[in-house]
Image (spheres, rainbow, N blue to C red):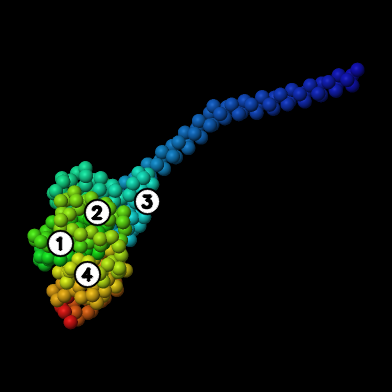
Amino acid sequence: MGTVCLWLFICLSVFITKLEIVYITVNSFFMTAIFVCPRMLLSLLSGLIMGAAVLFVLYRWVIPMAVQYHGGLALLWHDVIVERALDTLTRTSRPQRILKAVQTKATVGDPQSVITAIDHFCRHREWAMNVGDEKGSILDSVVNEVSPVTVLELGTYCGYSTVRIARLLPPGACVITLEFNPDYAAIARQVIKWSGLEDKVQLVEGASGDWIPWMKEHFGVQAFDLVFLDHWKERYLPDTKLLEECGLIQKGTVLLADNVICPGTPDYLEYVRNSPHYNSQYYRSHLEYTKAEDGLEKSVFLGY
């Protein structure tokens, strides 16, 4: 009997001990849920808020300030990171957003209002690789100086520089502008039409290397008074030589090349600066809508 009682006492003690363990475990769980988890959640939430705040400050002020003074960083940030992110988020392209800004802010038939609308959008909303307002003033001065009748623009993009040039041309003059990307060309046509300058512009879709040899036949152009190069930088030199071979550059023809520092066109600069057939001048400026150095190279063809 005593043995049985002892056995029952031991079993009861073990059972009670297990109950205590279960109680302590359950109690600890609820205490953790009540006191620790909220602290963890608050800590996590606080960390997320702080992280979001830091990212916002970086995106809104720190990075834009940094890329203002470094051309390579500016192109990486604006043309790769921001553009792709906005394209994904808005399901629109940058040229489409530029067109919307024109249609919202610019007056139909007023080229200057179109230029102003694009400049405001690109400086305050979303950067884009137009020639920009600062270098655009240099472009304006060259167009006024040359007073061209025939202009060739290589690289239309959204039509910003096309409008800048066409608005300054005398009656009877025209711009032939080449754009490889059909989506860009479609936007540019609408921008040019909005500015009221479609009668002074012929927009051609295709590669410059394919079209230059056919310029005389298709457009009846003997030579160009002004050539504005603002397309693929690696095509500046080959297309200049092709224009020479096709006789589309005559004595007095002015070549004006954009972005000769950023992204840069070292082979083109070496050619026009060292050739006895050109008199070249560098116009120091800044990469569009930034403080990073860039410039335009003006080269007057002297003949052979």
Instruction: Report crowding for label 1: few under 14, some 14 to 19, many 20 or more residues within 10 A (C-alpha).
Output: many
In the image, 154 versus 16, the foreground residue is 154
Query: In the picture, residue 286 is in which quadrant?
Result: bottom left
Instruction: Find disc 3 in the rendering and name its residue.
Output: 84
Residue 295 appears in the rendering: no
- Of the 4 image quadrants, the one containing the N terminus is top right
Residue 47, percent from left and from top: 44, 40
- At x 20%, y 62%, the residue is 176
What amino acid is found at the position of numbered circle 4 in the picture?
Glu
What amino acid is found at the position of numbered circle 3 in the picture?
Arg
Query: How many numbered marks are there?
Result: 4
Instruction: Find disc 1 in the rendering and name its residue.
Output: 174
- At x 23%, y 59%, the residue is 203
- At x 33%, y 61%, the residue is 72
Instruction: Find disc 4 in the rendering and name its residue.
Output: 217
Above or below, 26 relative to 186:
above
Residue 96, percent from left and from top: 29, 48
CA distance for labels 2 and 1: 16 Å
State the SS at label 2: helix
Residue 247 appears in the rendering: yes
- For marks 2 and 3, the one nearer the N-term is 3
